[in-house]
Image (cartoon, rainbow, N blue to C red):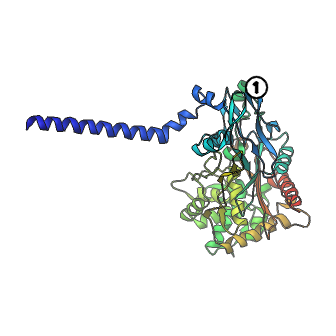
Amino acid sequence: MTENKKIIKVLISMLLLFFILMGYLTYFGMFIGPKYILSSYNRRQQLEEEKVLRGSIFDRNGIVLAKSEIKNEHQERVYPYKNLYSQVIGYNSRVYGRSLLEMTYNNYLLGMDEYSKALNAFSISGNVTRSGNNLYTTLDHSLQQLGEKLLEGKTGAIAAIDPKTGEVLALVSKPDYNPNENSLGTHWQDMTESVDSPFLPRATRGLYAPGSTYKVVTAALAVENGLGGLKIDDRGKVVIDGKTFSNDKDQAYGNIGLSDALAQSSNVFFSQLGVKLGENQLKDIANRMGLNKDIPFDIPVSNSLFPYKQMGKTDMAAVGIGQGKLLVSPFHMALIASSIANGGVMMKPTLVNKVISPKGLVMKENKPAELYKVMEADTAAEIGQMMQQVVNEGTGKKAAIKGIKVAGKTGTAENEISIKQKGGEHAWFIGYAPAEDPVIAIAVVLEYEGRTGGTAAAPIAGKMMGEYLKSLK
């Protein structure tokens, strides 16, 4: 009997070890293994990739943005437009690995899933035995080119989105770099050490104080809480709990209401409004807008931050005007503008429309989907009317498009430089058009511009929206 007990204990121990081993192998295969398989340092992976002609990447109209060519029996990744898509598509290099879209969709581009291997196996030339899948993005090449031209010589970003579908039309970040292999090799060290951070995709990963563009969020909260008719005596500055909040150049607007305060971007009005709304309400709408949350997207996006645990009156006032500890990405502000344009619904953003096999089969398709309901449709419509007033009569006049109704909001945001010395503020604009039936929402930020958003960022947004609308005719 004692011997039987010993045998049973040994068997149980062996079974436990077996299940532990199987559990670890399963965990490794599902969560850890893919990272090692796709690592640019995996020599076996590199050898396997040489057998696959990496798929091409296209814009929404079929223009080739990235392709692979065979030269001297080796593949070379070619980016025909050099710097233009470096902050969206990224790079694919034998030496430096891969980034952004090239990394996210690496498996599809190599046709390394089991379906692609079965469907696409055929001889191409030399060592290449099969072809990877092609990506068709939602990007508009002409709009992307215009954005690059408008940001020439500047540091900043542009994000443009179709508010009804969430399709990303343009993502421009400056500075940028040439992702072709020879250029990467020549300039890699200089770029990695540069204070200009050319590898930073500012549109999606840059974080900035939103400044007065965030007042559209504060205004929406006011409407929801029955404060749409609020009037405040604006004398150019106000002291809240010992801290002074001032309008630009201390401009006084007198007895002013919500719509006029948004049009003129009154800090006096919105700082006091922030205090009236209170901590819980400010946190609630920030949460609904997706701050502190991951944004699902085809390339990495930095989380916008609302980092307050407890808020004093000066914190509430600062948030009311888009300052304080608030940090947002231009991409996220474009999504917020798009949610107002889309009746209070923020659509899930998409960069890749379809993945198509070399034989024309659809391997993956991203369809429009709702991400968040951020406000009621009637609230969004009311804020939209106020944003039209910003462009028609207020600080956003330079975003106007002849014959088109435009909704927008300017912003001039303080930062670590402008707080210490006057000048160097970030210039912002968010908006959408046509206001009655929006097809494009946009956010523009210019780092350390030292001019107002209405002067510097609004004209860029107006030109981007205007050219896109022309292209649809």
The N terminus - image quarter: top left
Single out the residue that lies furthest toward the left. Answer: 1
Spot occupied by residue 286 in the image (x, y as percentages of width and height): 60, 59
Element assignment for label 1: helix
Q: Is residue 44 left or right of residue 232?
A: left
Spot occupied by residue 379 in the image (x, y as percentages of width and height): 67, 72
Single out the residue that lies furthest toward the right. Answer: 402
Task: Say which quarter of the image contains residue 128.
Answer: top right
Task: Say which quarter of the image contains residue 290.
Answer: bottom right
Of residue 170 and residue 275, the one placed in the foreground of this image is 170
Give the amino acid at mark 1. His
Q: Is residue 144 left or right of residue 322?
A: right
Q: How many numbered circles are shown?
A: 1
Task: Say which quarter of the image contains residue 154.
Answer: top right
Of residue 435 and residue 223, the one placed in the foreground of this image is 435
One can see residue 393 in this view: no
Spot occupied by residue 422 in the image (x, y as percentages of width and height): 76, 44
Of residue 312 and residue 346, the one placed in the foreground of this image is 346
Give the labeled residue for mark 1. Answer: 187
